[in-house]
Amino acid sequence: MTELELVQKAIDDKIGKDIVTLKLYSAVADYFVIATANAPNHAQSIIDEVEKVCDEHGFEILGKEGYSEGNWILLDLNDIIVHVFTEEARSFYDIERLWN
């Protein structure tokens, strides 16, 4: 499996909802993987699983933002940026519209 597929599977394994992968044509990253969590602690659980998979496969994690609040957690994997939102935060920020 590719790094992207492993990230998507990790999110799905933790019951992330509405998983969307955007192919970017940007220097920022190659992909955004966006998912919705039921609550902040669910978002944290999803990110924990992605980090575990990255550690197991030797994928570099460059940074993590928003973990303590849990409404929007960003995990920077260099070529892949993972965004996990609560439903309210995902509706408010609407990054699919901004980056699509």
Image (spheres, rainbow, N blue to C red):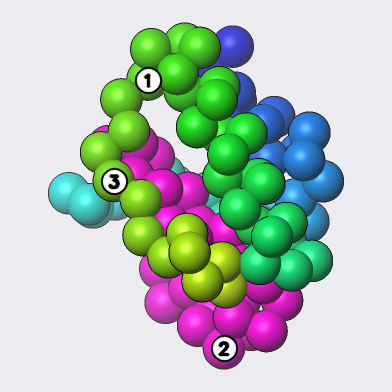
Q: Earlier in the sequence, mark 3 or mark 2?
A: 3
Give residue 84's quadrant in the image.
Answer: bottom right
Where does residue 24 sit, x and y in percent of width and height?
36, 51
Using the image as rendered, state which of residue 57 and residue 100 is in the foreground: 57
Element under disc 3: strand
Q: CA distance from mark 2 to mark 1?
A: 30 Å
Q: Residues within 10 Å of mark 2 (few under 14, many from 20)?
A: few
Above or below: residue 33 compared with residue 58: below
Using the image as rendered, state which of residue 40 and residue 99 is in the foreground: 40
Q: Amino acid at mark 2?
A: Phe
Q: Which residue is mark 3?
A: 63
Where does residue 86 sit, x and y in percent of width and height?
67, 72
Position of the N terminus, as image quadrant, is: top right
Above or below: residue 7 compared with residue 81: above
The residue shown at (47%, 23%) is 54
Q: Amino acid at mark 3?
A: Gly
Element under disc 2: helix
Above or below: residue 29 compared with residue 52: below
Q: Which residue is mark 2?
A: 92
59 relative to 42 in the view: left or right: left
Q: CA distance from mark 1 to mark 3?
A: 12 Å
56 relative to 46 in the view: left or right: left
- Tell me the tag on residue 43: none
The residue shown at (38%, 12%) is 58
Let me know if residue 91 is in the magenta part: yes
User: In the image, which residues are magenta?
Assistant: 73-100
Q: Earlier in the sequence, mark 2 or mark 1?
A: 1
The residue shown at (56%, 66%) is 70
Q: Marks 3 and 2: CB-CB under 8 Å?
A: no
Q: Amino acid at mark 1?
A: Phe
